Image: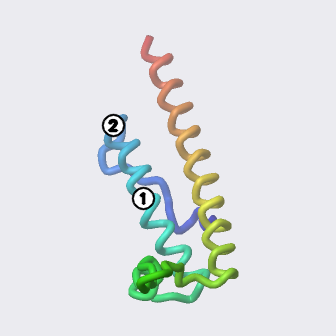
Amino acid sequence: MDETKYPRQYENPGNLLYDIKSLITELPLKFREIISHECAWSFATFYRKMRTSSNDKNTFSNLSNAEINMVFTVMDGIMDDFVREYEEYKTDTQKNILEMD
């Protein structure tokens, strides 16, 4: 995904719990922003699309097949980025711990 748009910035560097929570908290925000951009939706449309349409007998999604495919594509990219960022953070943190010993 777009790395320059989401630089890793920690407000409380060195605090493991805060850093991990910040990394996790960014996921839904990234997802909303990227899927809205890729599908040319406003944020209001994003939230409207999240609601299911229903009647007495049927509940169905408001997404087209192309939008469904885009959701999976975007989510795959976000999860790949998340795992990479987490692994980099974990490696750096463990290296710093070993240097302290």
Q: In which image quadrant can residue 4 be found? A: bottom right
Q: In the displayed structure, does residue 54 sit left or right of residue 75? A: left
What amino acid type should be assigned to the residue bearing mark 2? Leu
The C terminus lies in quadrant: top left
**Residue depicted at 47% across the width and 25% down the height:** 96
Secondary structure category for the residue under label 1: helix
Q: Position of residue 45 (x, y in %)?
A: 44, 88
Q: Quadrant of the N terminus?
A: bottom right
* Relative depth, front residue between 68 and 89: 68
Please state the total of marks drawn on the protein image.
2
Q: Which quadrant of the structure image shows residue 2? A: bottom right
* x then y, percent, for residue 93: 47, 30
Pointers 2 and 1 in contact (C-beta within 8 Å): no
Mark 2 nearby-residue class (10 Å; few <14, some 14–19, many ≥20):
few
Label 2 SS? helix
Label 2 sits on residue = 17
Q: Is residue 98 above or below residue 11?
A: above
According to the picture, the residue beneath numbered tag 1 turns out to be 26
- x%, y% of residue 71? 61, 71
Image position, residue 22 (x, y; %) = 37, 50
Q: Give the residue drawn at x 56%, y 89%.
A: 40
| Badge 1: residue crowd in 10 Å (few <14, some 14–19, many ≥20) | few
**Nearer to the camera, 37 or 9:** 37
Q: Residue at x 63, y 80 (%)?
A: 67
Most extreme residue toward the front is: 57
Q: Residue at point 59% right, 45% down?
A: 83
Disc with the residue nearer the chain's start (2 vs 1): 2
* CA distance for labels 2 and 1: 14 Å
